[in-house]
Image (tube, grey):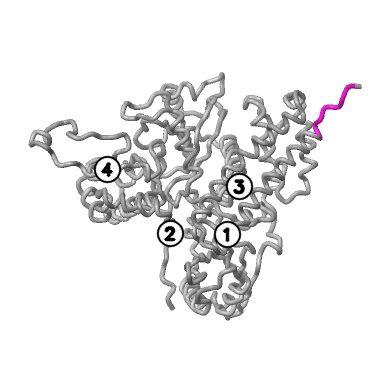
Amino acid sequence: MGQQWPAGEIAQLILEGFDNYREHFRQITDGAQARFEQAQWQEAQQASAARISLYEEKVAETREMLHRRIGEPLLEVGQWPLVKSAYIALIDLRFDDELAETWFNSIFCSLFSHDLISDGCMFIHTTRPSLRGHPASAQIRSYRPDGDLAGALLAIFEDYRFGVPYADLPGDVQRLEARLRQNLPDWVCKDPELCIELFSSVLYRNKGAYLIGRLYTRDEQWPLAIPLLHLEGRGIQADTLITDEAEVSIIFSFTRSYFMVDVAIPAEFVGFLKRILPGKHIAELYTSIGFYKHGKSEFYRALIGHLASTDDRFIMAPGVRGMVMSVFTLPGFNTVFKVIKDRFAHAKTVDRNTVIEKYRLVKRVDRVGRMADTQEFSDFRFPKAKFAPDCLAELLEVAPSTVVVEGDTVLVRHCWTERRMTPLNLYLENASETQVREALEDYGLAIKQLAAANIFPGDMLLKNFGVTRHGRVVFYDYDEICFLTEVNFRRIPPPRFPEDEMSSEPWYLVGPMDVFPEEFPPFLFADIGQRRLFGQLHGELYDADYWKGLQEAIRAGKVIDVFPYRRKSCAA
């Protein structure tokens, strides 16, 4: 008899690679508390970027190890259903089994071309149960105020202690009790059955720490978030208390960096979050806590489920056509799909590889709530019947190297997905006077917050920003972004002669990274009224010295405070 094909050995090696990835993921995550306590904000940003890069690094390591250990039998794709079967047996008793399936998929896709993908060889459909039932008691802490809200809050802060003391714990309790009474009906605060339930681990991101959970009675529930800040030199402070579902949802937004949080059973924690934030898709919740690859798996499963169960067809996304990207969408699925055009408009000087790197950069940097997260996909295959004819015709015209018809199937060789938003220029066309003012106020804040996080959008036209369902303005077109510190902000030199002002060409040399903020008003706003209003709200953006000041702060190592919630006063 010949040697048995090594399915079990391959499955074991894949799982060992996964364990290695998970251990390094935990090490980075477990350092979040110390970074918060020691106010190591730059290190926190570096750790966030390192953890994102970790997945692909460990996939590559595992692939190379498999090649060394197994050799040629590894690439006999017809035997991989045996590997999958052996792997299922290995992960059945794990608490992170759904993540292990996604890892298996990543390894398979790193070894084989995507036209070999099948549910027999990998986990297109999960073999795991859906989100687990109620969270295990070890993962949550419960408090029953029984009419004494201050006592319950004090007990909470006694349980959630840090290596740095609270700056003013009695004051925090007093302010948060007042906020709780403002947020909830009076009868709820007195209800003897009122319960406060918090996840046992603290969630860390950027310069904040968060206690996350819910308040509930027999008949109702409210999400609960308590953001904590480290006031350097003074200690920890509870910044506010949030029970509004929309505001807690924004904390878990697709525009934010991923949380660092110790999660023993990921599916149960995501299930917990899903119950308090029912409007969030589980893909987004997995992504929000750093498991972005599994979020990608859940997104894909939701997409193919939607296509199979509806008559929805892809159409071109509304808005001004892009000069670099072609964007299409499904009306009933809250996502846009972006493919790179084969030829760019003459005004664009970037190439395809540069665009790809810009989009990948966004994954690694702090998005400060102002840039949409993206997922990168290769070799999507969709039924041709799922495309509106004019949509498919346009894609085939502008991106024939990326979008290909193969019989009854459309192959999309490469694309990014983003959350669908209303383009800001379209939003303003139909907005009331109040809405216009609020949107332009937030548009300016978005530019300022990105800049303070060392991101310069490059092309700041209204069409490159979107408005979310919560009314926030978010940047989503990345082909011209760069680090703010790479830009040379200049004032326009005075004309040498009267004829200079009449010339169609500048009378001064312009370098590739030169930017003249004085030119922004007519460039950004065709509408004179909007131009004037924006100047009143954010006129400093037209001043080169403002941008230079931000650059100096960044070079000095300053990490800005950007809060993913409205900082209402908690004064009693």
Q: Where 8 falls versus 184 (above or below)?
A: above
Q: Residues within 10 Å of mark 1 (few under 14, many from 20)?
A: many
Residue position marked by numbered label 2 in the rendering: 561
Circle 1 sits in a helix, a strand or a loop, which is it?
Answer: strand
> Which is more toward the observer, 433 or 506?
506
Residue position marked by numbered label 4 in the rendering: 524
Question: Residue at coordinates 53% horizontally, 66% vertically from top-left?
Answer: 226
Q: Earlier in the sequence, mark 3 or mark 2?
A: 3
Identify which amino acid the numbered label 3 is placed on: Phe
Residue extending farthest to the right is 1
> Which is more toward the observer, 96 or 382?
96
Identify which amino acid the numbered label 1 is placed on: Leu
Residue 185 in view here: no
> Which is more toward the observer, 30 or 315?
30
Q: Are marks 1 and 2 in contact (CB under 8 Å)?
A: no
- Magenta: main secondary structure equals loop
Q: Which residues are magenta?
A: 2-8
Q: Quadrant of residue 65?
A: top right
Q: How many marks?
A: 4
Residue position marked by numbered label 3 in the rendering: 291
Residue extending farthest to the top is 407
Foreground mark, 1 or 4, reads 1
The reply to whether the magenta stretch includes residue 5 is: yes
Q: Earlier in the sequence, mark 3 or mark 4?
A: 3
Q: CA distance from mark 4 to mark 2?
A: 27 Å
Q: CA distance from mark 1 to mark 4?
A: 38 Å
Foreground mark, 4 or 2, reads 2
Q: CA distance from mark 1 to mark 3?
A: 14 Å
Q: Position of residue 119 (x, y in %)?
A: 69, 32
